[in-house]
Structure formats: C-alpha cells, structure tokens
Amino acid sequence: MFSGSAGKASTKGGCRAIRTLNKAQAIARAAAAKKALDIVIIDMRKFPTICDYFVIASGTSTPQIDAIADNIAEKLREKRERLFHREGNAAARWILLDYGDVVAHVFYEETRRFYDLERLWGDAPHKRFKEVRKKRKTTHGKKRRRT
C-alpha cells in the first residue's frame, strides 16, 4: 500500500510502522462494513503531525455516520486498541476518533467536501481503500446429496 520508511516511520522501527498501517486498514474495513463511502487512508508519516495515518470516510445520513464511528470503535476495542478521544457527533456531521498513531474522520458527504482534508494534505500519499471480498466456495455442477 504505502512504501518506504519516510519520515517518522524510520525512527519508530519497521514493526511499529506495519502495526500502525494494519490499524489504519482495520479502521477502513470497519467503516466499509457499514457502507462508508470514499474511504481514503492518508500516510502522514513524512509530516511533523500528531499521527501516522488519517483514515477518512463518508456517510450519507446522521444514523449512518454514527453507525460507522460506532463500528470502528467496536472493532478496534475487540483488537484491544485504545481510543484516546472521540470528538463530535453525527448531528455535527463530523466524528473524529483518535487512536494515537491513527486518526479516523467520519464525515457527512457535504461536510467532507467543505473541509477537504485530502486537498489540505495533498502532498501526503493517499490510498483509496477497496475491500477485497473473499470468494465463497461454490458447488457448481455438483448435486447435493439428500439424506
């Protein structure tokens, strides 16, 4: 996904950089599970910022924005990742989840266009998240036996 050991990653060590990227991908998967739109992971490591990655996702309604943020929090809690801070709510049209080295932004579509974080951090590498679905096993041409 992102290559090299630019910026902060080189001082933090390879294993931590991989773990942090895995955390960003877990956040993206949790957002995708709730049908988040236009999920982007921004590699912030070469900038003197407060985190290594931003994960940005959009929803089309306030209940969906809540559901996306709640699912991210639940899935990362299951992985024993600590949520340092949650800011905003769906009524505010932007929820921020701070996991220290990864920050998730869940926006209402219109609010995301207004703040345009992708343009603001345009010099940072961006990667659109596309979840790879596992293929289901099929029994093409095989008859099931009845018992």
Image: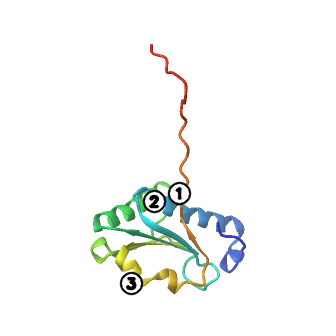
Q: Residue furthest front?
A: 141
Q: Is residue 5 left or right of residue 62?
A: right
Location of residue 116 in the rendering, given as x and y in whole percent from the top left corner? 45, 82
Q: Residue at x 31, y 73 (%)?
A: 89
Which element type, helix, strand or loop, lies under badge 3?
helix
Q: Say what amino acid the circle numbered 1 marks.
A: Glu
Contact check, label 1 and label 2, Cβ < 8 Å: yes
Q: Residue at x 48, y 67 (%)?
A: 39
Residue 147 visible in image: yes
Location of residue 127 in the rendering, given as x and y in whole percent from the top left corner? 58, 70
Q: Say what amino acid the circle numbered 2 marks.
A: Ala
Which element type, helix, strand or loop, lies under badge 1?
loop
Q: Quadrant of the N terminus?
A: bottom right
State the image quarter where residue 129 is shown: bottom right
Location of residue 83 in the rendering, given as x and y in whole percent from the top left corner? 45, 67
The residue singled out by tag 3 in the image is: 114
Q: How far is the residue under mark 3 from the one under mark 2?
A: 22 Å
Q: First in sequence, mark 1 or 2: give its number.
A: 2
Q: Pointer 3: residues within 10 angstroms few (<14), some, or many (20+)?
A: few
Location of residue 41 in the rendering, given as x and y in whole percent from the top left corner? 54, 70
The residue singled out by tag 2 in the image is: 32
State the image quarter where residue 111 is shown: bottom left
Q: Residue at x 62, y 78 (%)?
A: 45
The residue singled out by tag 1 in the image is: 131
Q: First in sequence, mark 3 or 2: give its number.
A: 2
Q: Nearer the viewer, residue 10 or 66?
A: 66
Q: How far is the residue under mark 3 from the one under mark 1?
A: 26 Å
